[in-house]
Image: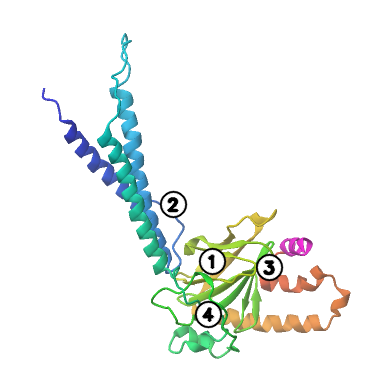
Amino acid sequence: MQQVPVSLWTLVAGIVVTAISIWIGQNHTLMPVQASLQAPLVDGFFNVMFTIAIALFLVVEGTIVVFLIQFRRRPGDDTDGVPIEGNLPLEVFWTAIPTVIVLLLGIYSVDVFNRMGGFDPAGHPHSAAHVAQMPGTALAATLSDTSQATTAPSIAPTIGIGASPQTLNKPADLVVDVKGMQYAWLFNYPDSGITSGELHIPVGADVQLNLSAQDVIHSFWVPNFRLKQDALPGIPTELRFVATKPGTYPVVCAELCGGYHGSMRTQVIVHTPEEYNSWRTENQIAQKENLNQVVAVNPADLSTSEFLAPHTHNMGISAATLESVVMSH
């Protein structure tokens, strides 16, 4: 019986490994549902890395299994193994291939980062009038009736993931000021005066988050958007994105910020433009009513937690979270 050449076995093994790794790399369920325009860019890069990782795993582990079987010690064989000093071509091969892979992945990652606006050097003005400056968009038409925007002066360029090259130097549809504090997120809408403990945005809108931190470093992470940006004390950062799927998605602090770091969670609610306009109107009315109630009471007679308690529901903050924030300060 003629023996099958090793080169043929190697070719067959390479075809099988390639097919398996590509199929698994493109059909896994490791990532949450995509909900932003930027998510497919990140997922595409992740799928490539995962495909390469599967291929390397199969090659390395498959080789180990084959060698364990092929070169196992037979019963009664007490001889020494073949003395092999080294193999220069093999050493070059397994050094050069990973080097090329890492370089290509690095170039790919830079391209993805640039397409997501990570290399935007110009920064964006933190203006509350951005919505009114977007004529012709459905969102601008929806929000213009109730907009009370006032223009704020531009500040120094921020760091973070900003506008993509396609939206560079264009104002965002919606600007939200986000403040991280131990252990909650607060969202302020300059164009309407609404303050909330949840992020509410319309689907399809170009949203700009101006991030800051009151105490320590926090990290604003929305897994479904595939976006994460640090909130730094004293240093403005920015996150700009477009949500593509209505729904409710978790917001997590991804930077260890203290003893209650694990409870620093909230959610981003992506509305249709009509739903967002209704939410905006309702909250403007509710906050005016709460303000009138607070004015009727002498604030000097209330503790900090009692003073803020009427607002916790509208802000999406639980009483326990409010108490922990008050105690920490």
Instruction: Say whether disc 4 or disc 3 marks the residue closer to the N-terminus.
Output: 4
Instruction: Say whether disc 2 or disc 4 marks the residue closer to the N-terminus.
Output: 2
Q: Which quadrant of the rendered structure holds the C terminus?
A: bottom right
Q: Which mark is residue 214?
A: 3
- Reading the image, the residue beneath label 4 is 174
Does residue 281 appear left or right of residue 90 in this picture?
A: right
Whole-angstrom CA distance, mark 2 to mark 4, is 31 Å
> Going 17% across and 35% down the picture, which residue do you hit?
7
Q: Do the CB atoms of the residues marked 3 and 2 lie less than 8 Å apart?
A: no
Q: What residue type is labelled 1?
A: Thr
- Reading the image, the residue beneath label 2 is 30
Front tag of 1 and 3? 3
Q: Are there few (<14), some (14-19), or many (20+) residues within 10 Å of tag 2?
A: few
Furthest-top residue in this view: 76
Q: Which amino acid does label 4 sit on?
A: Leu
Instruction: Say whether disc 4 or disc 1 marks the residue closer to the N-terminus.
Output: 4
Q: Do the CB atoms of the residues marked 4 and 3 lie less than 8 Å apart?
A: no
Whole-angstrom CA distance, mark 1 to mark 2, is 19 Å
Q: Do the CB atoms of the residues marked 4 and 1 lie less than 8 Å apart?
A: no
Front tag of 4 and 1? 4
Q: Which amino acid does label 2 sit on?
A: Leu
Specify the segment rendered in magenta.
319-329
Q: In which quarter of the image is residue 166?
A: bottom left
**Depth order, front residue of 113/47:** 113
Q: In this view, does 113 lie above or below 167?
A: above
Q: Which mark is residue 248?
A: 1
- Assign a secondary structure to mark 2: loop
Q: Is residue 220 magenta?
A: no
Front tag of 3 and 2? 3
**Depth order, front residue of 196/65:** 65
Whole-angstrom CA distance, mark 4 to mark 3, is 23 Å
Instruction: Say whether disc 1 or disc 3 marks the residue closer to the N-terminus.
Output: 3
